[in-house]
Image: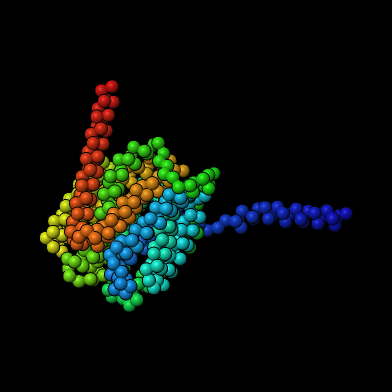
Amino acid sequence: MVSTMQTDLSTQSARDSAAVFRPALRVRWRLPDRAAFVLLASVVVTFLAGSSAPTPLYATYQQEWHFSPVTTTVVFAVYAVALLSALLTAGSLSDHVGRRPVILAAIAVQVVAMGVLAAAAGVPELVIGRVLQGLSTGAALGAIGAALLDLDTRRGTIANAVSPPIGTAVGALGSGLLVQFVPAPTELVYLLLLAALVAQAGGVALMRETSSPAPGAWASLRPEVVVPAAVRRPVLAAIPMLVAVWGLGSLYASLGPAVVAGLVGTRSAALGGLALFTLAAFGALAVVLTRHTAITRVARVGASALALGAVLTVLALGAGSVVGFFAATAVAGVGFGAGFQGAIRSVVPLAAPHERAGVLSVLFLVSYLALGLPAVVAGFLVVHGGGLLRIAEGYGGVVALLALVALAGQLATTAGQRRRRTAACLG
């Protein structure tokens, strides 16, 4: 009897000890929030670097596989279409299942895409790789952007505006330099990105989840565009700017290397990548320099610089001036960065935490429609409607017009706000 009681007491004591130590055993080291913030921003940079990396490679692909400029723009466009599809279906998924699962799944698909692109032996593999790349990027952008906002709303808004142009710049210039100076560039650039993604996946696995699960995950996969009432007016006001900004980005990403080759008279991959790098780098610089400036002023600066840069680009192309083209690109880059930041900052902070991924996905949906569709049209016109520089001049003129429309909208919005404040004071 005593023995039995001792056994029971020993068993209970073991259970009590297990209960005490079980939480400690479950405790797992997590990445500090500050480090997680930097990591997530770097993942956006890597994804966008991957999206722009093929731009300097298109000339190499054309020489090896003998396809036309139409094929180049189609390959570019399938990426945008795949990305749009992911934004429409998985854009708000992380609002329901959490940020980390969506980000990790997107990185896994992006790793597969890098492998496909590194091993590509023709246009079909290139298209498959770009489709996978677009799907993973579309799924990742909303989730990562929302996670950045979860960690720090103010800094997250800036990071969402500055990370894409930095990634675009790094991918364009890095890929161009590899093509110019390193053997097997069409494999190496993707393998480097693959290695970076694997390392980043390890970091994401160690960060804490920033969003609580919510019901409706399956329903969120139905393709639809949902804009919460609180941000509808700001989203509508931001659309002209987003279209102008990413329409210009489309020109540089799809036709930039060919335009530079026509101006310079050489198919230097480094110079081809330098055009997109200049646009994106000055865009990132503009975001950093105007991050503390009032939103309305940032939007006006963005629209003005974008319109001026597009007009100067058209003039430089007409004059055949390489220096003028790159100077105009720098001015347009300021508009690119300031305009995109103005659009993001005018909308995102107004969204509730459980709406952030969905709202960001809507903004990226508009952006990538403006990025993908004009590229296809421009590629078709280059082959069937006139010379490359002539089409690029017309393209730049359309972007300038869109930027002026965006500027007029910003001025009207500012005037309306001023009238409402005056009426409120008088009332």
Residue 94 is left or right of residue 328, and the answer is right
Closest to the observer, 228 or 20: 228
Rendered residue at 25%/65% (across/down): 257
Among all residues in the image, which is located at the extreme top? 427
Above or below, comparing residue 234 to residue 32 in the picture: above
Above or below, comparing residue 130 to residue 20 in the picture: below
Residue 240 is left or right of residue 211, and the answer is left
Image location of residue 115, percent across then percent down = 43, 69
Image location of residue 356, percent across then percent down = 42, 45
The quadrant of the rendering that contains the N terminus is bottom right
Among all residues in the image, which is located at the extreme front? 384
Q: Is residue 305 visible?
A: no
Above or below, comparing residue 180 to residue 278 in the picture: below
Rendered residue at 31%/69% (across/down): 67
Rendered residue at 45%/66% (across/down): 112
The quadrant of the rendering that contains the C terminus is top left
Among all residues in the image, which is located at the extreme bottom? 183
Among all residues in the image, which is located at the extreme left? 319
Closest to the observer, 171 or 255: 255
Circle count: 0
Image location of residue 367, percent across then percent down = 33, 50
Above or below, comparing residue 193 to residue 149 in the picture: below
Image location of residue 361, percent across then percent down = 40, 48
Rendered residue at 49%/58% (across/down): 105
Closest to the observer, 151 or 179: 179
Closest to the observer, 259 or 153: 259
